[in-house]
Amino acid sequence: MNEEIIHIDGLPTTAVASAKHGGTLVVLLHGYSMTPADLAPFAHSLGNAGVFLFPEGPFPALSGGRAWFPMDDAARQAAQRTGPRDLAERHPAGLAAARERLGSYLRACAARFRPEKTVLGGFSQGGMLACDAVLHGTAVVDALLLMSASRLNIGEWQAHAARLGTLPMLISHGKTDPDLAFSAGAALKDFVAAAGAEVTWLPFDGGHEIPLVVWRAVRKFLRRPCLAPSNARAK
């Protein structure tokens, strides 16, 4: 698979591709204080035909790396000292703008690559943004990957839950996550399942991370017949 840095809708993006057009497009959003380089190497081992895109968040994080919407680092660190968090009642000030930015990015991706199927996902803050954008209708995708995430703006999310329909979803969370509580991941799984989504739930022994067991589950998830392009299904 070929890897290059491209710009899509103003965002630097690491693209890992076995095909330039058509097929399946997978867009994965990094977490807070991370960069695309933290995720992109795994695309080479997933072995799926199509295009993987790892965009860079538009904001610098004070602790290094990038972010999709600003966070108060001091408040975040103070909260972590009391134990892992569930963010269901949090209302991040920059979230609405971030989901609109993501929607614009995905439309530019669709125009550029003309995919048959689009899978959106992310880790931590990236996963929460991905789910929020789908719930608000700014992202229209064929499947979601949510790794070590939490609910946000739970009142708004519940009001838009019907948009999840029967969407295929993979949700993973570490049982000893020191940042976002395991119970927050389990509550996210219960929320989307109650909305009708077709959920694959992967709890794992570990913390706030994406271990090999998760990447193996992602590879298996992306090979589901419902996500395969028509030429692959015909074989």
Image (spheres, rainbow, N blue to C red):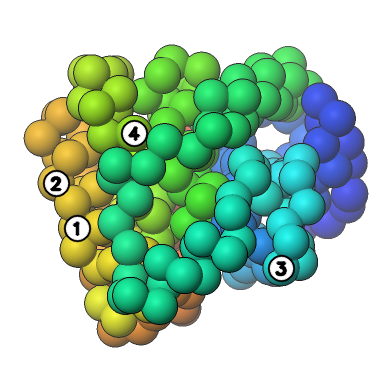
Label 3 with label 1: CB-CB less than 8 Å = no
* Sequence-earlier tag: 4 or 3: 3
| Relative depth, front residue between 141 and 153 | 153
Q: Is residue 91 left or right of residue 198?
A: right
Of badges 2 and 4, the one in the foreground is: 4
- Identified at 54% across, 24% down, the residue is 96
- Label at residue 116: none
Q: Position of residue 138 (x, y in %)?
A: 51, 17
Question: Crowding at label 4, few (<14), some or many (≥20) Cα neighbours within 10 Å?
Answer: some
- Whole-angstrom CA distance, mark 4 to mark 3, is 25 Å
* Sequence-earlier tag: 1 or 4: 4
Question: Crowding at label 3, few (<14), some or many (≥20) Cα neighbours within 10 Å?
Answer: few
Q: Is residue 93 left or right of residue 157?
A: right
- Identified at 60% across, 61% down, the residue is 73
- Identified at 44% across, 44% down, the residue is 128
The residue beneath circle 3 is 63
Asked whether residue 28 is in view, the answer is: yes
- Label at residue 190: 2
Q: Is residue 235 left or right of residue 89?
A: right
